[in-house]
């Protein structure tokens, strides 16, 4: 934010602005930037997902659009989807139906604000950063529930009910898995969390103690469930519920859900990098020459690849098995991680 | 245990929990446009949340009056219609029809033709089972096995194209033989190479990727159990019956063609991961049948005799003496029977088809009760129905 403020001050006649105006301008620029980055990410990841799926399934994926490995496929799809007719079912609850995709989108967009891309480069440097991320990203549940209810379609309703149950449940282990990290850092500020992992790979939180190592995997699994992707894609389950909560959506409204899914995917990966995998710090000193933001994004993309790998390999679990996994396995394990990490901190003298 | 409770109790939705606030079961229309119904099957479900109370299969969306057409076209022309019954294994459908027809015509078939028929039938069975595995994986949310199985099926289609000229619908068998001889360009050795690859490598891959995957087993073990008595009562055949542990296969128990000459086993469900007759058993029977098909093909090709591949010259019109005959073969889906009543003319007086998918589907009404919607999808997938055969 400071960099941005300095930049704006260089514009002639900007000196006389009040702090409030300055703040609003900064926020608007930052928000636009985040939105562009997010939309770009969604574009790139849709292409990447097709290529990864193709790679895993012994085929090529898109090859034609844009000549080189179908790089323009996502753009072509986006244009196509923009040109689609926007259908609102006759008996749908119009207000909710229109508002739902915006809410889902908003949830992930807001969460992106607190991601620390590089030292000092964060849209919203909040003291409660991590908590804020989890708080706003759970707004998506409301959006999904609204979408399913407003569509006036039984399959969509099923998808929404499943989605709500799943996302609310998995937020618990997701948040619990991050608590040991917060205990180590003594802060919920996203920048502080990354700064605490300075000094090589062994200082990353994932390698700090065995409980954190387990907590990372718990976070990863819960993250897959939170982003509604296979093997936990209950709200969609295209072979069971047709297309889940967005069955009736077309055109740009559907694209919003789509965009939000990929934005969430990257968001969850970035949070994993931020709290467990050293944020913008390079794994070995040799790689220090890389810009921090680039290191951060590369790590994030690797996490996304891992997520896609899992999605394209495993069958889907059943909805009750999913709940069973959450409440009877993951929550106890993450709780043990919290307690274990606390004891480890006391014993090893790292308690803050 | 839970299923029994659901079947007997009135259920949550039927009771008035809040005075004055009535709750009722949700009627849900699954299909005919639904990704998991394998075509245009429609299921009317009565659900309470995720649990299904009543399943009513509704059929007829793909009805093409094939049996009526049989009364209008001559015997040989109807072979093309049998291709379109079970379009995933048309060779076995061809086989079923021509065996029945030859029974009516009292037509002998040369030994070489029988061998070729068995080879192409078993290849077709493998192709069908590969699709069954693929789509079953897809129903369970595993996308990748779909592409792997289709990759192997593609090789089978190529092989069958080389021998018959068609990739999907072959119209290959004729009364008294097959339409074309084995191609001269190493077709037989290519088939042997292919089945060796399947036996040694591909089946292991499928098993690692899908069959013994923990999530997959968790989804299928003890789900939608068809006990042996139910399977027999409902007239189930094929992998559905054998998955329930009943060792019945027309190739062994009512040998047709030259199957009695070959050495192979009939895999049955043994309840390895759960109860006998659960979805996993039915799935696994298909995997093991692919292995057995490979064995049969190898034997049939290695002992392929010389001689004619057709008993009679290919004529446009064949006639059958008045009479009736029923003949059944083991198609990929089960017992496929044809009952032909001939009146001495060029066309059949009546041609009744007993299609395995149709009978297998009926069991859903009983077994589907008390399942969750996700399990119902597993049940449909494990029955491996083809709508072209159900509606005809």
Image: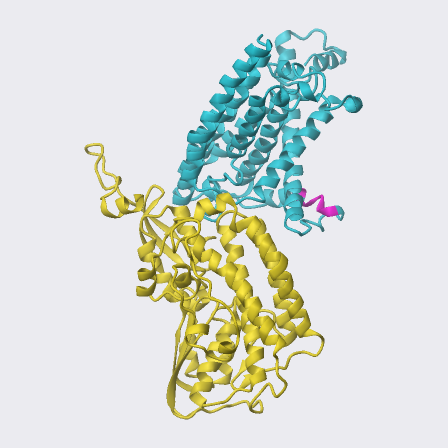
Is residue A189 in view from this perspective?
Answer: yes
Residue B125 percent location from the top left of the image: 52, 67
Q: Name the residue at the left extreme.
A: B19
Q: Nearer the viewer, residue B224 or A137?
A: B224
Q: Is residue B7 left or right of residue B385?
A: left
Is residue A142 in view from this perspective?
Answer: no
Please identify the quarter of the rendering in which residue A219 is found: top right
Q: Is residue B247 above or below residue A187?
A: below
Chain B painted colour: yellow
Residue B199 percent location from the top left of the image: 60, 61
Spot the cyan chain and give its letter.
A
Which range of residues does the magenta coloring cover? Answer: A69-75
Q: Nearer the viewer, residue B160 or B81?
A: B160
Q: Nearer the viewer, residue A55 or B78?
A: A55
Q: Name the residue at the front extreme.
A: B263
Q: Is residue B171 above or below residue B295?
A: below
Q: Nearer the viewer, residue A56 or B248?
A: B248
Where is the C terminus of chain B found, in terms of image quarters?
bottom left
Asked if the magenta segment contains residue A72, the reply would be yes
Residue A12 percent location from the top left of the image: 76, 12
Identify which residue is drawn at 47% across, 42% down. Answer: A317
């Amino acid at each position: 934010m400071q960099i941005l403020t300095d930049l704006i001050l260089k514009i002639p006649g900007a000196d006389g602005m009040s702090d409030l105006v300055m703040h609003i301008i900064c926020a608007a620029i930052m928000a636009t930037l985040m939105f562009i980055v997010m939309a770009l990410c969604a574009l790139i990841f849709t292409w990447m997902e097709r290529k990864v799926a193709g790679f895993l399934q012994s085929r090529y994926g898109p090859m034609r659009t844009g000549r080189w490995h179908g790089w323009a496929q996502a753009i072509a799809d986006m244009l196509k989807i923009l040109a689609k007719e926007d259908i609102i079912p006759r008996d749908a609850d119009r207000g909710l139906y229109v508002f739902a995709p915006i809410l889902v989108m908003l949830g992930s967009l807001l969460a992106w604000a607190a991601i620390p891309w590089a030292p000092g480069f964060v849209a919203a440097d909040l003291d409660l950063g991590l908590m804020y991320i989890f708080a706003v990203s759970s707004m998506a549940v409301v959006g999904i529930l609204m979408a399913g209810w407003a569509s006036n379609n039984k399959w969509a309703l099923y998808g929404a009910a499943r989605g709500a149950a799943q996302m609310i449940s998995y937020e618990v282990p997701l948040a619990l898995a991050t608590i040991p990290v917060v205990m180590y850092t003594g802060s919920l500020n996203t920048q502080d969390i990354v700064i605490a992992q300075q000094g090589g790979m062994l200082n990353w939180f994932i390698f700090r103690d065995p409980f954190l190592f387990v907590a990372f995997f718990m976070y990863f699994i819960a993250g897959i469930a939170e982003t509604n992707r296979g093997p936990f894609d209950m709200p969609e389950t295209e072979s069971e519920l047709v297309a889940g909560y967005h069955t009736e959506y077309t055109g740009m409204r559907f694209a919003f859900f789509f965009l939000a899914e990929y934005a969430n995917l990257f968001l969850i990966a970035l949070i994993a990098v931020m709290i467990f995998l050293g944020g913008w710090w390079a794994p070995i000193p040799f790689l220090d020459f890389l810009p921090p933001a680039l290191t951060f994004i590369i790590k994030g993309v690797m996490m996304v690849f891992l997520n896609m790998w899992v999605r394209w390999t495993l069958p889907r679990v059943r909805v009750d098995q999913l709940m069973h996994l959450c409440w009877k396995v993951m929550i106890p394990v993450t709780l043990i991680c919290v307690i274990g990490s606390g004891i480890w901190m006391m014993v090893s003298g790292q308690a803050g | 245990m839970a299923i029994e409770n659901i079947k007997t109790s009135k259920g949550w939705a039927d009771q008035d929990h809040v005075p004055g606030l009535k709750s009722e079961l949700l009627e849900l229309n699954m299909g005919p446009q639904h990704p998991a119904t394998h075509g245009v099957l429609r299921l009317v479900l009565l659900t309470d949340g995720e649990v299904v109370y009543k399943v009513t299969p509704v059929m007829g969306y793909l009805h093409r009056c094939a049996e009526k057409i049989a009364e209008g076209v001559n015997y040989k022309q109807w072979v093309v219609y049998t291709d379109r019954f079970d379009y995933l294994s048309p060779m076995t459908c061809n086989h079923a029809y021509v065996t029945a027809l030859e029974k009516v015509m009292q037509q002998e078939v040369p030994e070489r033709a029988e061998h070729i028929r068995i080879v192409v039938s078993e290849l077709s069975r493998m192709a069908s089972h590969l699709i069954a595995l693929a789509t079953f994986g897809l129903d369970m949310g595993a996308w990748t096995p779909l592409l792997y199985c289709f990759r192997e099926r593609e090789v089978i289609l190529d092989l069958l194209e080389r021998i018959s000229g068609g990739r999907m619908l072959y119209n290959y068998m004729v009364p008294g033989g097959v339409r074309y001889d084995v191609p001269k360009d190493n077709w037989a050795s290519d088939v042997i190479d292919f089945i060796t690859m399947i036996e040694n490598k591909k089946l292991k891959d499928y098993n690692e990727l899908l069959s013994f995957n923990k999530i997959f087993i968790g989804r299928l073990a003890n789900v939608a159990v068809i006990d042996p008595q139910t399977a027999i009562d409902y007239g189930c055949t094929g992998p559905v019956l054998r998955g329930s542990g009943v060792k019945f296969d027309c190739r062994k128990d009512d040998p047709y063609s030259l199957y009695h000459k070959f050495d192979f086993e009939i895999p049955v469900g043994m309840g390895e991961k759960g109860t006998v007759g659960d979805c996993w058993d039915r799935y696994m029977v298909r995997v093991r049948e692919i292995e057995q098909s490979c064995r049969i093909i190898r034997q049939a090709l290695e002992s392929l005799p010389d001689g004619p591949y057709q008993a009679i010259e290919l004529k446009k019109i064949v006639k059958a003496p008045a009479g009736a005959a029923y003949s059944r073969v083991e198609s990929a889906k089960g017992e496929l029977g044809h009952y032909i009543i001939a009146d001495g003319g060029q066309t059949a007086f009546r041609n009744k088809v007993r299609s395995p998918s149709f009978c297998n589907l009926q069991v859903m009404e009983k077994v589907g009760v008390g399942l969750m919607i996700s399990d119902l999808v597993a049940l449909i997938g494990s029955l491996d129905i083809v709508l072209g055969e159900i509606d005809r």
